[in-house]
Image: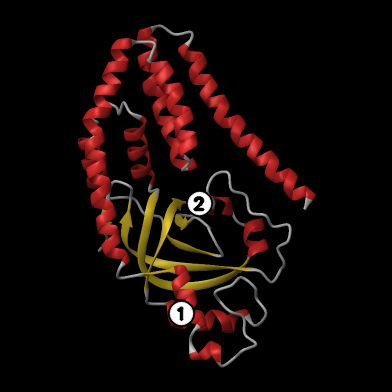
Amino acid sequence: AADTEQLLAAHEAFRKLMLNSMADLVSADAGRVTPEEAQLLYVRYLGPIARVCAIAGDETVRETLQQSLNTLAGRSPEFTQEVAAYASATSEALRWRNRMSAAHARTARQEAQSLQALLDAASATDALKSRPARSNPAVNKLTVSAPLLVQDVAAVAVGKPAFADFITPQANNVSTSWLTTYHFLRLPSQQIPTAEVAALKRDLLVAEGAPPLSLEAAIAIETAESGSLSAAGGEVAGVELQGTLIHFIRNEATGHLAVGVTPDLSKTTIAETLWQFDIQPKWLQHEYIFVNLP
Protein backbone atom coordinates (compact mmCIF):
# COMPACT_ATOMS: atom_id res chain seq x y z
CA ALA A 1 0.00 0.00 0.00
CA ALA A 2 2.82 2.39 0.85
CA ASP A 3 4.48 1.74 -2.52
CA THR A 4 1.19 2.42 -4.29
CA GLU A 5 0.72 5.69 -2.43
CA GLN A 6 4.23 6.76 -3.40
CA LEU A 7 3.54 5.89 -7.04
CA LEU A 8 0.28 7.85 -7.02
CA ALA A 9 2.00 10.83 -5.41
CA ALA A 10 4.85 10.72 -7.94
CA HIS A 11 2.36 10.43 -10.81
CA GLU A 12 0.42 13.47 -9.63
CA ALA A 13 3.60 15.46 -8.99
CA PHE A 14 4.86 14.75 -12.51
CA ARG A 15 1.50 15.72 -14.02
CA LYS A 16 1.53 19.06 -12.22
CA LEU A 17 5.17 19.66 -13.11
CA MET A 18 4.52 19.02 -16.79
CA LEU A 19 1.51 21.32 -16.83
CA ASN A 20 3.21 24.12 -14.89
CA SER A 21 6.37 23.83 -16.99
CA MET A 22 4.42 24.24 -20.22
CA ALA A 23 2.50 27.21 -18.82
CA ASP A 24 5.73 28.78 -17.51
CA LEU A 25 7.42 28.28 -20.88
CA VAL A 26 4.66 30.13 -22.72
CA SER A 27 4.65 32.92 -20.12
CA ALA A 28 8.44 33.22 -20.29
CA ASP A 29 8.28 33.61 -24.06
CA ALA A 30 5.66 36.31 -23.61
CA GLY A 31 8.20 38.29 -21.57
CA ARG A 32 10.99 38.18 -24.16
CA VAL A 33 9.42 38.47 -27.61
CA THR A 34 8.31 41.42 -29.69
CA PRO A 35 4.60 41.89 -30.49
CA GLU A 36 5.19 40.54 -34.01
CA GLU A 37 7.02 37.47 -32.69
CA ALA A 38 4.27 36.92 -30.12
CA GLN A 39 1.70 36.41 -32.87
CA LEU A 40 3.81 33.73 -34.57
CA LEU A 41 4.58 31.96 -31.29
CA TYR A 42 0.92 32.03 -30.26
CA VAL A 43 -0.08 30.13 -33.42
CA ARG A 44 2.80 27.66 -33.00
CA TYR A 45 1.95 26.98 -29.36
CA LEU A 46 -1.78 26.63 -29.99
CA GLY A 47 -1.56 23.20 -31.68
CA PRO A 48 0.55 21.43 -29.02
CA ILE A 49 -1.44 23.03 -26.21
CA ALA A 50 -4.70 21.92 -27.83
CA ARG A 51 -3.27 18.38 -28.00
CA VAL A 52 -2.42 18.39 -24.29
CA CYS A 53 -5.87 19.71 -23.38
CA ALA A 54 -7.57 17.11 -25.57
CA ILE A 55 -5.68 14.27 -23.91
CA ALA A 56 -6.17 15.62 -20.40
CA GLY A 57 -9.90 16.25 -20.68
CA ASP A 58 -9.52 18.49 -17.63
CA GLU A 59 -10.98 21.98 -17.42
CA THR A 60 -8.29 23.06 -14.95
CA VAL A 61 -5.58 22.18 -17.47
CA ARG A 62 -7.37 24.15 -20.16
CA GLU A 63 -7.82 27.20 -17.94
CA THR A 64 -4.17 27.22 -16.86
CA LEU A 65 -2.83 27.00 -20.39
CA GLN A 66 -5.43 29.46 -21.67
CA GLN A 67 -4.12 32.05 -19.22
CA SER A 68 -0.59 31.59 -20.56
CA LEU A 69 -1.80 31.96 -24.13
CA ASN A 70 -3.65 35.13 -23.16
CA THR A 71 -0.43 36.53 -21.70
CA LEU A 72 1.42 35.77 -24.92
CA ALA A 73 -1.27 37.27 -27.15
CA GLY A 74 -1.37 40.29 -24.84
CA ARG A 75 2.07 41.35 -26.09
CA SER A 76 0.20 42.76 -29.08
CA PRO A 77 -3.03 44.69 -28.36
CA GLU A 78 -3.99 44.43 -32.03
CA PHE A 79 -3.51 40.67 -32.04
CA THR A 80 -5.44 40.35 -28.77
CA GLN A 81 -8.38 42.05 -30.47
CA GLU A 82 -8.02 39.74 -33.48
CA VAL A 83 -8.10 36.65 -31.24
CA ALA A 84 -11.16 37.98 -29.39
CA ALA A 85 -12.95 38.73 -32.66
CA TYR A 86 -12.18 35.22 -33.96
CA ALA A 87 -13.47 33.61 -30.76
CA SER A 88 -16.64 35.67 -30.95
CA ALA A 89 -17.17 34.77 -34.61
CA THR A 90 -16.75 31.01 -34.09
CA SER A 91 -18.18 30.34 -30.63
CA GLU A 92 -21.79 30.31 -31.81
CA ALA A 93 -20.95 27.79 -34.55
CA LEU A 94 -19.38 25.52 -31.95
CA ARG A 95 -22.38 25.86 -29.62
CA TRP A 96 -24.77 24.99 -32.45
CA ARG A 97 -22.66 22.02 -33.52
CA ASN A 98 -22.44 20.78 -29.93
CA ARG A 99 -26.22 20.93 -29.51
CA MET A 100 -26.82 19.06 -32.77
CA SER A 101 -24.27 16.35 -31.96
CA ALA A 102 -25.73 15.85 -28.48
CA ALA A 103 -29.29 15.67 -29.84
CA HIS A 104 -28.37 12.98 -32.39
CA ALA A 105 -26.49 11.04 -29.70
CA ARG A 106 -29.50 11.09 -27.36
CA THR A 107 -31.62 9.54 -30.10
CA ALA A 108 -28.99 6.88 -30.83
CA ARG A 109 -28.61 5.98 -27.15
CA GLN A 110 -32.34 5.33 -26.85
CA GLU A 111 -31.86 2.33 -29.14
CA ALA A 112 -28.85 0.94 -27.24
CA GLN A 113 -27.77 -0.09 -23.74
CA SER A 114 -24.85 0.86 -21.55
CA LEU A 115 -22.28 -1.84 -20.80
CA GLN A 116 -23.42 -1.95 -17.18
CA ALA A 117 -27.01 -2.55 -18.32
CA LEU A 118 -25.86 -5.50 -20.43
CA LEU A 119 -24.04 -7.01 -17.45
CA ASP A 120 -27.05 -6.46 -15.23
CA ALA A 121 -29.26 -8.15 -17.83
CA ALA A 122 -26.90 -11.14 -17.94
CA SER A 123 -27.02 -11.39 -14.14
CA ALA A 124 -30.80 -11.65 -14.27
CA THR A 125 -30.95 -14.52 -16.76
CA ASP A 126 -32.31 -17.92 -15.75
CA ALA A 127 -28.99 -19.49 -16.76
CA LEU A 128 -27.16 -17.57 -14.07
CA LYS A 129 -29.92 -17.71 -11.49
CA SER A 130 -29.97 -21.50 -11.76
CA ARG A 131 -26.31 -21.67 -10.75
CA PRO A 132 -26.02 -19.77 -7.46
CA ALA A 133 -22.37 -20.71 -7.08
CA ARG A 134 -21.51 -18.85 -10.27
CA SER A 135 -19.90 -15.41 -10.25
CA ASN A 136 -22.10 -12.40 -10.83
CA PRO A 137 -20.90 -10.80 -14.08
CA ALA A 138 -21.97 -7.35 -12.86
CA VAL A 139 -19.24 -7.39 -10.21
CA ASN A 140 -15.52 -7.88 -10.59
CA LYS A 141 -14.85 -11.05 -8.60
CA LEU A 142 -14.28 -14.33 -10.41
CA THR A 143 -15.13 -17.43 -8.39
CA VAL A 144 -15.95 -19.93 -11.13
CA SER A 145 -14.96 -21.06 -14.61
CA ALA A 146 -14.31 -18.02 -16.79
CA PRO A 147 -15.35 -19.68 -20.10
CA LEU A 148 -18.79 -20.55 -18.70
CA LEU A 149 -19.29 -17.06 -17.36
CA VAL A 150 -18.24 -15.49 -20.66
CA GLN A 151 -20.60 -17.86 -22.46
CA ASP A 152 -23.58 -16.68 -20.43
CA VAL A 153 -22.74 -12.98 -20.81
CA ALA A 154 -22.08 -13.37 -24.54
CA ALA A 155 -25.45 -15.06 -24.98
CA VAL A 156 -27.10 -11.90 -23.68
CA ALA A 157 -24.78 -9.24 -25.11
CA VAL A 158 -23.62 -10.34 -28.55
CA GLY A 159 -25.75 -8.82 -31.27
CA LYS A 160 -27.19 -6.18 -28.95
CA PRO A 161 -26.66 -2.44 -29.55
CA ALA A 162 -24.45 -0.85 -26.89
CA PHE A 163 -22.61 2.41 -26.26
CA ALA A 164 -19.91 3.89 -24.05
CA ASP A 165 -18.48 7.35 -23.39
CA PHE A 166 -15.01 8.90 -23.74
CA ILE A 167 -13.44 6.95 -26.60
CA THR A 168 -9.71 7.41 -27.18
CA PRO A 169 -7.40 5.96 -29.85
CA GLN A 170 -4.92 3.31 -28.67
CA ALA A 171 -2.09 1.34 -30.25
CA ASN A 172 -2.74 -1.51 -32.69
CA ASN A 173 -5.50 0.37 -34.54
CA VAL A 174 -8.10 0.11 -31.80
CA SER A 175 -9.94 2.64 -29.67
CA THR A 176 -11.31 2.07 -26.19
CA SER A 177 -13.59 3.80 -23.74
CA TRP A 178 -12.17 5.14 -20.49
CA LEU A 179 -12.12 2.52 -17.78
CA THR A 180 -14.41 4.16 -15.24
CA THR A 181 -15.51 0.88 -13.69
CA TYR A 182 -14.81 -2.80 -14.36
CA HIS A 183 -15.73 -2.84 -18.01
CA PHE A 184 -14.77 -1.03 -21.19
CA LEU A 185 -15.65 -0.87 -24.86
CA ARG A 186 -13.21 -1.69 -27.66
CA LEU A 187 -13.70 -0.92 -31.34
CA PRO A 188 -11.58 -0.59 -34.46
CA SER A 189 -9.96 2.85 -34.51
CA GLN A 190 -12.34 5.26 -36.17
CA GLN A 191 -11.52 8.38 -38.11
CA ILE A 192 -14.27 10.94 -38.50
CA PRO A 193 -14.91 11.22 -42.26
CA THR A 194 -12.68 13.79 -43.92
CA ALA A 195 -15.66 15.69 -45.29
CA GLU A 196 -17.06 16.16 -41.77
CA VAL A 197 -13.72 17.45 -40.46
CA ALA A 198 -13.45 19.79 -43.45
CA ALA A 199 -16.94 21.15 -42.73
CA LEU A 200 -15.95 21.79 -39.11
CA LYS A 201 -12.86 23.69 -40.28
CA ARG A 202 -14.95 25.81 -42.63
CA ASP A 203 -17.30 26.73 -39.81
CA LEU A 204 -14.25 27.70 -37.76
CA LEU A 205 -12.87 29.85 -40.62
CA VAL A 206 -9.80 27.62 -40.88
CA ALA A 207 -8.04 27.19 -44.21
CA GLU A 208 -4.55 27.01 -45.66
CA GLY A 209 -2.70 29.97 -44.19
CA ALA A 210 -5.59 30.76 -41.81
CA PRO A 211 -5.15 28.66 -38.63
CA PRO A 212 -7.56 28.65 -35.69
CA LEU A 213 -6.94 31.44 -33.19
CA SER A 214 -8.88 30.24 -30.14
CA LEU A 215 -7.98 27.31 -27.93
CA GLU A 216 -11.57 26.07 -28.11
CA ALA A 217 -11.43 25.87 -31.90
CA ALA A 218 -7.97 24.28 -31.90
CA ILE A 219 -9.12 21.56 -29.48
CA ALA A 220 -12.20 20.90 -31.64
CA ILE A 221 -10.02 20.32 -34.70
CA GLU A 222 -7.39 18.31 -32.83
CA THR A 223 -9.94 15.87 -31.38
CA ALA A 224 -11.80 15.55 -34.68
CA GLU A 225 -8.60 14.72 -36.58
CA SER A 226 -7.28 12.31 -33.94
CA GLY A 227 -10.52 10.35 -33.54
CA SER A 228 -11.06 11.26 -29.88
CA LEU A 229 -14.79 10.82 -29.33
CA SER A 230 -17.37 11.77 -26.74
CA ALA A 231 -19.11 8.43 -27.30
CA ALA A 232 -19.57 5.60 -29.76
CA GLY A 233 -22.17 2.90 -30.22
CA GLY A 234 -22.76 -0.20 -32.25
CA GLU A 235 -23.51 -3.90 -32.18
CA VAL A 236 -21.65 -6.07 -29.68
CA ALA A 237 -19.51 -8.50 -31.66
CA GLY A 238 -17.70 -10.25 -28.84
CA VAL A 239 -17.06 -10.40 -25.09
CA GLU A 240 -13.82 -11.14 -23.25
CA LEU A 241 -12.99 -11.50 -19.56
CA GLN A 242 -9.54 -10.34 -18.50
CA GLY A 243 -7.68 -10.44 -15.22
CA THR A 244 -7.27 -6.91 -13.88
CA LEU A 245 -3.66 -7.37 -12.81
CA ILE A 246 -2.61 -9.07 -16.02
CA HIS A 247 -4.40 -6.47 -18.12
CA PHE A 248 -2.54 -3.56 -16.54
CA ILE A 249 0.79 -5.38 -16.46
CA ARG A 250 0.88 -6.40 -20.11
CA ASN A 251 -1.19 -3.73 -21.78
CA GLU A 252 -0.82 -0.02 -22.49
CA ALA A 253 -3.97 0.23 -20.39
CA THR A 254 -3.38 3.74 -19.09
CA GLY A 255 -5.15 4.88 -22.23
CA HIS A 256 -8.38 3.68 -20.63
CA LEU A 257 -7.99 6.23 -17.85
CA ALA A 258 -8.56 9.92 -17.52
CA VAL A 259 -5.22 11.73 -17.27
CA GLY A 260 -4.28 11.99 -13.61
CA VAL A 261 -6.11 8.78 -12.67
CA THR A 262 -3.95 5.81 -11.70
CA PRO A 263 -5.57 2.50 -10.73
CA ASP A 264 -4.90 1.41 -7.16
CA LEU A 265 -3.92 -2.23 -7.62
CA SER A 266 -2.48 -2.69 -4.13
CA LYS A 267 -5.49 -4.71 -2.96
CA THR A 268 -6.32 -6.30 -6.32
CA THR A 269 -6.36 -10.09 -6.33
CA ILE A 270 -5.88 -12.54 -9.16
CA ALA A 271 -9.64 -13.20 -9.04
CA GLU A 272 -10.58 -9.65 -10.03
CA THR A 273 -11.58 -9.10 -13.62
CA LEU A 274 -12.38 -6.64 -16.38
CA TRP A 275 -15.03 -7.12 -19.05
CA GLN A 276 -14.10 -6.12 -22.59
CA PHE A 277 -16.95 -5.59 -25.05
CA ASP A 278 -15.97 -5.49 -28.72
CA ILE A 279 -18.39 -3.64 -30.96
CA GLN A 280 -18.86 -3.03 -34.65
CA PRO A 281 -19.47 0.73 -34.55
CA LYS A 282 -22.63 2.18 -36.05
CA TRP A 283 -22.33 5.76 -34.85
CA LEU A 284 -19.69 8.15 -33.54
CA GLN A 285 -20.23 11.21 -31.37
CA HIS A 286 -17.60 13.92 -31.36
CA GLU A 287 -18.24 17.02 -29.27
CA TYR A 288 -19.11 18.92 -32.45
CA ILE A 289 -19.85 16.16 -35.00
CA PHE A 290 -22.21 13.18 -35.12
CA VAL A 291 -21.73 10.47 -37.73
CA ASN A 292 -23.88 7.48 -38.64
CA LEU A 293 -21.74 4.74 -40.15
CA PRO A 294 -22.85 2.39 -42.93
State the mark number for residue 157: none
Residue name at image x 52 percent, y 48 percent:
258
Residue name at image x 55 percent, y 89 percent:
129
**Quadrant showing the C terminus:** bottom left
Residue name at image x 32 percent, y 56 percent:
284
What residue occupies the far right of the structure in this picture? 2
Residue 159 visible in this rendered orientation of the protein: yes
Vertical relation: 150 (above or below) 74: below
In this image, 226 relative to 18: left or right?
Answer: left
> Residue 274: x, y in percent?
58, 67
Residue 205 visible in this rendered orientation of the protein: no
Q: Which residue is more in the foreground, 103 or 182?
A: 103
Q: How is the image coloured?
A: secondary structure
> Residue 202: x, y in percent?
20, 36
Disc 2, disc 1: CB below 8 Å? no
| Badge 1 density bin: few <14, some 14–19, many ≥20, Cα 10 Å | some
State the mark number for residue 171: 2
Separation of residues labelled 2 and 1 (CA atoms): 31 Å
Q: Quadrant of residue 283?
A: bottom left
Number of marks in the image? Answer: 2
Identify which amino acid the numbered label 2 is placed on: Ala
Identify which amino acid the numbered label 1 is placed on: Ala
Circle 1 sits on which residue? 121
Mark 2, secondary structure of its residue: loop
> Residue 221: x, y in percent?
33, 38
In this image, 14 relative to 163: left or right?
Answer: right
